[in-house]
Image (spheres, helix red, strand yellow):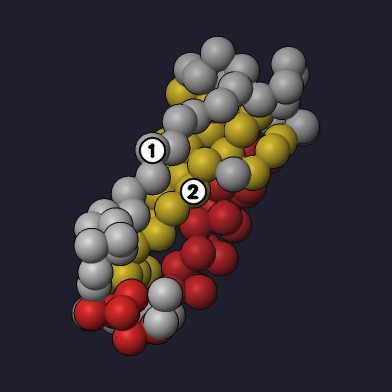
Amino acid sequence: MLVEEYFRGSSSTPISTNKFVCWQPSILGVVKINFDDSLQNNSATREYTLRDRKGEVIKVGVAYYGQTSIIMAKVQALRGGVREAIVAGCRKITIK
């Protein structure tokens, strides 16, 4: 398929590229940090969730950062999740 066909669309081009993502448990004794960011009109927010092996929420955090780049929002989301995991006493973590 040509690049032009992809962007123009064709009968063989899927209309949607949605992908179902399912949470997977971590290893026993390891806390999982999921984090995400959002950027709209150069204003960024971030959120993180700490979960145990069973998927039980240990801690959730959300913050508004104002005018920044998407990469800074991602870094701040990761940083916030790791910092809160340490404060909560988690010594073994995995990041997704």
When the figure is inspected, residue 53 is found, relative to residue 96, above or below; the finding is above
Q: Nearer the viewer, mark 1 or mark 2?
A: 1
Kindly tell me whether residue 95 is visible in this rendering: yes
Query: Label 1: few (<14), some or many (≥20) within 10 Å?
Result: few
Mark 1 touching mark 2, by CB under 8 A? Answer: no
- Badge 2: how crowded within 10 Å, few (<14), some, or many (20+)? many
Q: Residue 43's quadrant in the figure?
A: bottom left
Q: Nearer the viewer, residue 64 or 23?
A: 23
Q: Quadrant of the C terminus?
A: top right
Q: Which residue is mark 1?
A: 20
Residue pictured at 60% horizontal, 22% vertical: 25
The numbered mark, 1 or 2, whose residue comes first in the sequence reads: 1
Give the Cα separation between the discs numbered 1 and 2: 17 Å
According to the picture, the residue beneath numbered tag 2 turns out to be: 35
**Amino acid at pointer 1:** Phe
Please tell me which residue is depicted at 45% across the width and 68% down the height of the picture.
73
| Element marked by disc 2 | strand
Q: Position of residue 80 (x, y in %)?
A: 54, 53
Residue sitting at the far bottom = 4
* Residue at disc 1, secondary structure: loop
Q: Is residue 25 above or below residue 37?
A: above
Tell me which residue sits at (48%, 17%) in the image: 56
Image x and y of residue 83, in percent: 62, 48
Q: Quadrant of residue 15?
A: bottom left
Q: Amino acid at mark 2?
A: Phe
Camera-nearest residue between 77 and 87: 77
Residue 59 seen in the figure: no
Q: Report the number of numbered marks.
A: 2
Decide: is 16 above or below 70. above
